[in-house]
Image (cartoon, rainbow, N blue to C red):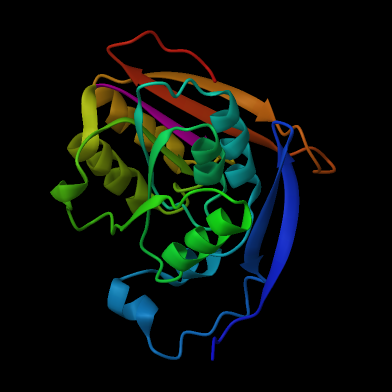
Amino acid sequence: MQAYATRNERLSIGGHTYRLRVLSDKQQFSDSNGHRACMGLSATQWGLFGQLWPSERLLAQAMHRFTVDGKRILELGCGIGLACLVLKRRGADIVASDAHPLAESFLAYNAALNALPAVDYHRLQWDAPQPSIGHFDVIIASDVLYEPVQALLLAEIVKRHAYPSAEVVITDPGHSHSQHFSQLLAEQRFQLNEERCPMDDRDVPPYRGHLLHYSRNREASCT
């Protein structure tokens, strides 16, 4: 018997309606088997799973407009998988990843809920190199810079898995750690194009996040 309650949400991205299974609230998930401690996840990381956060919606909207032809894309911390579903609907070559033990099942369920093919998924802990997943033209993530260590870990992921010519797209609510991450990517010869972006849907007042688009060996452009 599952130790959590769920509900369904609907939202529109680019004129398409997406149905999503999410956790009923961020406080009710039980971890009686101690998965969080075994996987080295902080309490903050554990509690963030299973919700539809504004930065995730902003990333999904960016991916609806993003040029995907011929690009292999990796999402870090995919959560319930909204951005992956948008990319899958567009026919993109997308690989999802997360460290949370429920991410794979939620992603698979949500793909089926939207009549989409299964998304390739890898369980990926940022501090445990996994060379088997290969290299990518684009690495994306939403709201992943909420702890100081995340900037360093994310930069190392980029170093290991980005092609020499690559892009990194991060949506962020304005955490101070994004500046450190930008410095680390500058050391890898990435150039930053930052845009403060309003949401195009339901927030009142409107959510305004930061779209951080890093490019290496190609002209920087905002999605």
Q: Is residue 28 visible?
A: yes
Q: Against 78, is 23 above or below?
A: below
The part of the image, by quadrant, that contains residue 214 is top left
* Residue 137 coordinates in the image, percent (x, y): 31, 27
Q: Is residue 175 visible?
A: no
Report if residue 166 lies within the magenta region. Answer: yes
In this view, 223 is above or below 32 = above
| Residue name at image x 42 percent, y 12 percent | 220
In-front residue for pair 79/174:
79
Question: Left of 79 or right of it: where is 160?
Answer: left
Whole-percent x, y for residue 200 in the image: 75, 32
Magenta-tinted stretch: 165-171
Q: Is residue 119 above or below residue 8?
A: above
Depth check: give the residue in front, 103 or 220. 103
Quarter holding the N terminus is: bottom right
What is the residue that sits farthest to the right in this orientation? 204
Main secondary structure type of the part rendered in magenta: strand
Q: Is residue 67 left or right of residue 216?
A: right
Nearer-the-camera pick, 15 or 51: 15
User: Residue 98: which quarter of the image?
Assistant: bottom left
Question: Residue placed at 24% from the left, 31% from the top?
Answer: 162
Q: Position of residue 180 (x, y in %)?
A: 37, 36
Which residue sits at x=54%, y=42%?
Answer: 83
